[in-house]
Image (cartoon, grey):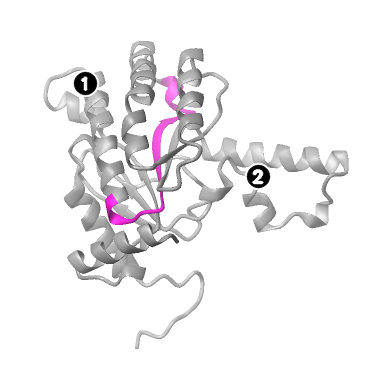
Amino acid sequence: MTKDFEKKRKDTARRLGIAPEKIPRRIAIIMDGNGRWAQNRGQPRIIGHQQGGKTVQKIALDCVAVGVESLILYSFSSENWKRPKEEIAGLMKLYRQYLVGIRPLLKKNNVKLLHLGRLEGLPENVVEELDKTQQLTAGHTGMKLGLALNYGGRNEIIDACKKIASKCKSGEMEVDDIDRDTFAGHLYRPQMTELDLLIRTAGERRVSNFLLWQISYSEFYVTDVFWPDFDKTDLEEAIKDYAYRQRRFGDVKSSG
């Protein structure tokens, strides 16, 4: 961990009254409730997605300030293609605009954007802007921001299996070489495989095919707040809740 991360974590810990080592380094968020947020206000669902995009930028910056090393956001799942065509078209337009508009913010805050998911099926103009934003931020050394777009946890595992099988077939790898580290190294983003805290908004209590490998020992935090209303206070509540949990990783630890 760099001195910058360490300083931010110490400052956050002091402000929240917790130990620096109790702050999650790797967070993922299932951003739920955009449509319901809009419908509750008598507005089209796309308005909720627009507001949700603004929340993404705010929370990403809040995570940078807290000292989070990586943040993965569940933006569009492989199952979301079942939604109405009009909504999908609106979402893809928003993604393209977002990927262009967020570049100055990523540059200013030294944030590196990484995509998780399959490119196949995404509109060409979205793929182009996604690639460009990743290339422009490739040298950034601050927080990693993972955008799970056209992502499915089962697809990720299947794709990793195919990569490994291909290497075994070509003789590049032996079956006995396969272990947990090997498998994790063939996921979409190996540098983001360990996850400390999974947050889900809008009160739903399911993982929805998200980061199935990575959440093996993650702590879960569920809030009833819809994603467009999720703010820094809500983020810090999740962090404080996490800080007071005892992570055992299958072990049995004395309570004192």
137 or 60, which is in the foreground? Answer: 137
Provide the residue designation for mark 2. Answer: 186
Whether residue 150 is visible here, answered yes or no, is no
Which region of the structure is painted magenta? 65-82
Q: Is residue 135 above or below residue 121?
A: below
Q: Return the residue found at the far bottom.
A: 256
Q: CA distance from mark 1 to mark 2?
A: 37 Å
At 58% from the left edge and 35% from the top edge, which residue is drawn? 155
Across and down, in percent, residue 49 comes to 27, 25
Secondary structure state at the residue bearing disc 1: helix
- Kindly indicate the quadrant of the structure image that contains residue 243: bottom left
The amino acid at mark 2 is His
Is residue 43 toward the left or the right of residue 11 in the image? left
Question: How dense is the environment of label 1, judged by Cα within 10 Å: few (below 14), some, or many (20 and up)?
Answer: some
Across and down, in percent, residue 195 comes to 46, 55
Across and down, in percent, residue 212 comes to 52, 47
- Whether residue 30 appears in magenta in the rendering, the answer is no
Provide the residue designation for mark 1. Answer: 47
- Whether residue 70 appears in magenta in the rendering, the answer is yes
Q: Is residue 160 above or below residue 86?
A: below
Across and down, in percent, residue 182 comes to 69, 53
| Quadrant where the image shows the C terminus | bottom left
The amino acid at mark 1 is Ile
At 80% from the left edge and 41% from the top edge, which residue is drawn? 167
Whether residue 59 is visible here, answered yes or no, is yes
